[in-house]
């Protein structure tokens, strides 16, 4: 059993963080938040390049999270360069709005590949690394959809995010005695390109569905992620943190 430190301010000075899905709305905001908190951030995504406005402390690498080869290569290279990875943030995701009767096996496989296996692959690689270090924090982006059966997404997305919630509870239990933390942020509707893609046909009104009166912004989720991966949450693991403007009061 490792010695679990007391909670402390939400700073990441001297820590190394790896972020997947870093060019998306939530991923980009999270990358910038981690860097602002003092972390050295390796931002990754399937895109060839990433633009973070010249912010200091950020290095970009292309990474297809569905590829085991990419997972081994990227993480091994980062470990060789930095010696450790203290924080792993899983933001890569894709979404589908097709109802059950119109969905196909191909669509299900595509959604599961990115949203579930795209989390599992780096987590499975990093778990023994963090355990050997005696410290590490993993945070995955889940969804309110996994808790209420969907908002605008279809069943494949709901199922994939539900699996991520369950996976991280397992990781949290297995890692608790080794200093490995695992928690999930479950956003409600957040104004990102992915959300707009799903709702462009009939955008719902935030005033009718969100008690706090607006949809979330990427920065709302990024700050919750920063809390969970920082020393401020040293006595929290295995949680699913709802960040949804009051849509779900659990």
Image (cartoon, rainbow, N blue to C red):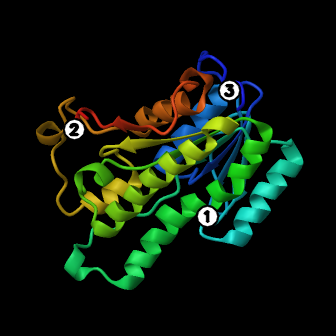
Q: CA distance from mark 2 to mark 3?
A: 31 Å
The residue tagged 2 is: 247
Q: How far separated are the C-alphas under marks 1 and 2? A: 30 Å
Quarter in which the C terminus is drawn = top left
Name the spot of residue 221 as percent of width and height, x first.
Answer: 43, 37
Image position of 182 with respect to 10: above or below: below
Q: CA distance from mark 3 to mark 1?
A: 24 Å
Q: Residue at x 70, y 63 (%)?
A: 71
User: In x, y percent, where is residue 4?
Assistant: 66, 24
Residue designated by label 1:
65
Image quadrant of residue 97? bottom left
Q: Residue furthest left?
A: 208
63 or 240: which is nearer to us? 240
Quarter holding the N terminus is top right
Q: Earlier in the sequence, mark 2 or mark 3?
A: 3
* Tag 3 residue: 12
User: Is residue 54 in view?
Assistant: no
In the rendered structure, find residue 119 and report the number of the disc placed on it.
none
Label 2 residue SS: loop
Q: Residue at x 52, y 50 (%)?
A: 170
Instruction: Decide: few, some or many residues near mark 3? Use Cα within 10 Å; few <14, some 14-19, many ≥20.
Output: many
């Amino acid at each position: 059993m490792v010695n679990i430190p007391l909670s402390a301010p939400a700073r990441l000075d001297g820590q190394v963080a790896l972020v997947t899905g870093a060019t998306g709305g939530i991923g980009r905001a999270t990358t910038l938040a981690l860097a602002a908190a003092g972390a050295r951030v390796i931002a990754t995504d399937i895109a060839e390049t990433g633009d973070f406005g010249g912010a200091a402390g950020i290095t970009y690498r292309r990474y297809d999270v569905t590829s085991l080869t990419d997972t081994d290569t990227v993480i091994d290279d980062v470990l060789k360069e930095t010696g450790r990875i203290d924080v792993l943030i899983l933001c890569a995701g894709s979404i589908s709005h097709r109802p059950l009767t119109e969905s196909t096996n191909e669509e299900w496989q595509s959604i599961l590949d990115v949203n579930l296996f795209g989390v599992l692959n780096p987590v499975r690689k990093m778990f023994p690394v963090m355990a050997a270090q005696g410290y590490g924090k993993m945070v995955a982006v889940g969804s309110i959809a996994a808790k209420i059966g969907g908002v605008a997404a279809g069943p494949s997305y709901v199922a994939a995010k539900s699996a991520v919630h369950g996976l991280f509870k397992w990781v949290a239990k297995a890692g608790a005695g080794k200093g490995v933390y695992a928690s999930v942020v479950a956003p409600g509707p957040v104004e990102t390109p992915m959300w707009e893609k799903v709702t462009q046909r009939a955008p719902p009104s935030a005033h009718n569905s969100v008690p706090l009166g607006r949809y979330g912004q990427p920065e709302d989720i990024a700050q919750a992620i920063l809390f969970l991966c920082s020393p401020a949450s040293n006595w929290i693991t295995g949680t699913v943190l709802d960040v949804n403007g009051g849509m779900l009061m659990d």
